[in-house]
């Protein structure tokens, strides 16, 4: 079959990715198709349920959100006000590009590389490399502070914004690995902190470590 662009319109009134009437045209995307999620006003945003597996040639999220509790095989690009949510047990197989303004929350797995210049929260796993650019925002795992686990290389750069909102500081001081990766290149020039109380501080002496 010829490739097509499938745009989420929630025409069936559900969140189910696998329902054809939720797409325009009314066809569930296949491996050769491009997926477009671009309407944040819709009450029903797409979700791949636990146990379901789908694939696409490319998935773009520029507004609204895509939630994955099952599995998606596709490169994913997040931009604008778009959001990608990978729940525990869910996974994306493919590279993920999170552009400035976009949000990626990963409690499951990303089997691929992640290029991040938006907001990234990951308590799951990333099996490829992680590249953080100047406008990256890392949301620290709540409630007790958890870092990110990356199997590949981590590229650091520019000013890193850290969001500690919702984190309960269970010890004083409290320490954890912000990023755990196989290897690191470059470094951060500065930190921009949010979510810390007036009587709290952050030490940037060690922000990452090699090895899992």
Image: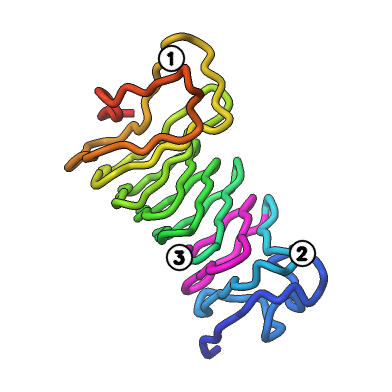
Which percent across, then down, holds residue 117? Answer: 37, 55
Spatial CA distance of label 2 from label 1 is 40 Å
**Would you say residue 58 sits in the magenta stretch?**
yes
Give the prevailing secondary structure in the magenta stretch: strand
Q: Name the residue carrying label 2.
A: 43
Spatial CA distance of label 2 from label 3 is 22 Å
Q: Name the residue carrying label 1.
A: 174
Between 176 and 6, which is closer to the camera in this rendering? Answer: 176
Residue at left offset 46%, top offset 35%: 194
For mark 2, does the 10 Å Cα neighbourhood hold few (<14), some (14 to 19), or many (20 or more) residues? few
Which percent across, then down, holds residue 99? Answer: 41, 61
Is disc 2 placed on a helix, strand or loop?
A: loop
**From the viewer's perspective, is residue 12 above or below residue 125?**
below
Which percent across, then down, holds residue 71? Answer: 58, 55
- What is the quadrant of residue 144 in the picture? top right
Q: Earlier in the sequence, mark 3 or mark 1?
A: 3
Q: What quarter of the picture does the N terminus occupy?
A: bottom right
Q: Which residues are magenta?
A: 52-79
Is disc 1 placed on a helix, strand or loop?
A: loop
Q: Check the image and name the residue furthest to the left.
A: 186
Spatial CA distance of label 3 from label 1 is 35 Å
* Residue contact between numbered discs 2 and 1, judged by CB atoms under 8 Å: no
């Amino acid at each position: 079959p010829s490739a097509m662009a499938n745009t989420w319109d929630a025409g069936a009134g559900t969140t189910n990715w696998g329902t054809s009437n939720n797409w325009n045209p009314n066809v569930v995307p296949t491996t050769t198709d491009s997926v477009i999620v671009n309407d944040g006003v819709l009450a029903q945003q797409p979700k791949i349920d636990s146990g379901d597996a789908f694939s696409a040639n490319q998935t773009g999220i520029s507004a609204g959100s895509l939630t994955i509790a099952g599995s998606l095989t596709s490169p994913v690009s997040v931009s604008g006000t778009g959001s990608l949510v990978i729940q525990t047990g869910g996974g994306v197989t493919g590279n993920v590009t999170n552009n400035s303004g976009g949000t990626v929350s990963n409690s499951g797995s990303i089997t691929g590389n992640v290029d991040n210049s938006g907001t990234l929260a990951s308590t799951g796993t990333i099996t490829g490399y992680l590249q953080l650019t100047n406008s990256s925002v890392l949301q620290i795992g709540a409630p007790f502070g958890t870092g990110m686990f990356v199997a590949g290389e981590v590229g650091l750069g520019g000013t890193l914004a850290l969001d500690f909102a919702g984190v309960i500081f269970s010890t004083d001081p409290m320490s954890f690995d912000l990023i755990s990766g196989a290897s690191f290149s470059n470094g951060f020039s500065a930190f921009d902190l949010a979510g810390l109380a007036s009587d709290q501080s952050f030490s940037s002496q060690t922000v990452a470590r090699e090895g899992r």
